[in-house]
Amino acid sequence: MNFRAAVFDLDGTLLDSMDVWEKIDIAFLKKRGLPVPSGYVTEICARSFIEAAEYTIALFHLSESVDAIIREWNEMAAYEYAHNVALSPFTGDYLRQLKHAGIKLAVATGLPQKLYEPCLKKNRIYDLFDVLCSTDDMARGKEYPDIFVHCAERLGVTPEQCLVFDDVLPAVRSAKQAGMIVYGVFEKYSEHNMEEIKKIADGYLIDFHSAPSPTPVVRKVV
């Protein structure tokens, strides 16, 4: 496959972390005497932290502020990401294969830097990435193409030269809207959207063992 850059989601794609968020959501809502509705984790995972907090406040009619909820989520997640969240199967090998082939690498995530940076460093893949983008730094979440376009601009490539990997339907849809090659990645929390993701995406992975191999970048010797 001919692409010059690869853009990766983190939660549920590169990182085996979705169970962490289910635990956090259960604990957060239980503290308030609320159940976790079906589909809640999937619904918020493509959103920025601000959008997820706004959605949560509206859904449960909470009186708390967006900042207070985000602060509580970050405190609950910080230890897990720094110590316990591991890579999804075969991701490290695939990232290094791409890097060796001269492919530029980026992250497009809904996680804030305080969570993703220690996790990527602990898993020894932080230095593989040329660009790290969070929806915290964007006006809108990954259900819009903004972050994917931003990644391409920072990588110095066109959207058509980017291969995106993501596990949730809104992000797969918006990356396609940006004009990128898109592969869906299996995640149990998004399994109910699998067939729709397959219709939109250019490919679909169960894990990165079957991820597309790049065409090596040929560097001319002057």
Image (cartoon, rainbow, N blue to C red):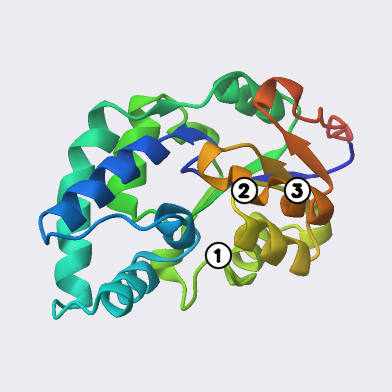
Count of labels in the image: 3
- The residue to which callout 3 is attached is 195
Question: Secondary structure under badge 3?
Answer: helix
Give the mark, 2 or 1, whose residue is nearer the N terminus. 1
- Residue at left offset 26%, top offset 41%: 23
Tag 3 and tag 1, C-beta contact below 8 Å? no
Tag 3 and tag 2, C-beta contact below 8 Å? no
- The residue to which callout 2 is attached is 192
- Residue 215 appears left or right of 74: right
Real-space CA distance between mark 3 and mark 1, rounded to the nearest whole angstrom: 20 Å
Q: Is residue 33 above or below residue 107?
A: below
| Amino acid at circle 3 | Glu
Question: Secondary structure under badge 1?
Answer: loop
- Residue at left offset 35%, top offset 65%: 49
Depth check: give the residue in front, 77 or 206: 206
Badge 2, how many Cα within 10 Å: few under 14, some, many 20+?
few
Quarter of the picture containing the N terminus is top right
- Residue 95 appears left or right of 161: left
Badge 3, how many Cα within 10 Å: few under 14, some, many 20+?
few
Give the mark, 3 or 1, whose residue is nearer the N terminus. 1
Badge 1, how many Cα within 10 Å: few under 14, some, many 20+?
many
Real-space CA distance between mark 3 and mark 2, rounded to the nearest whole angstrom: 8 Å
Give residue 142's mark. Answer: 1
| Amino acid at circle 2 | His
Corner quadrant of residue 13: top right
Give residue 104's mark. Answer: none
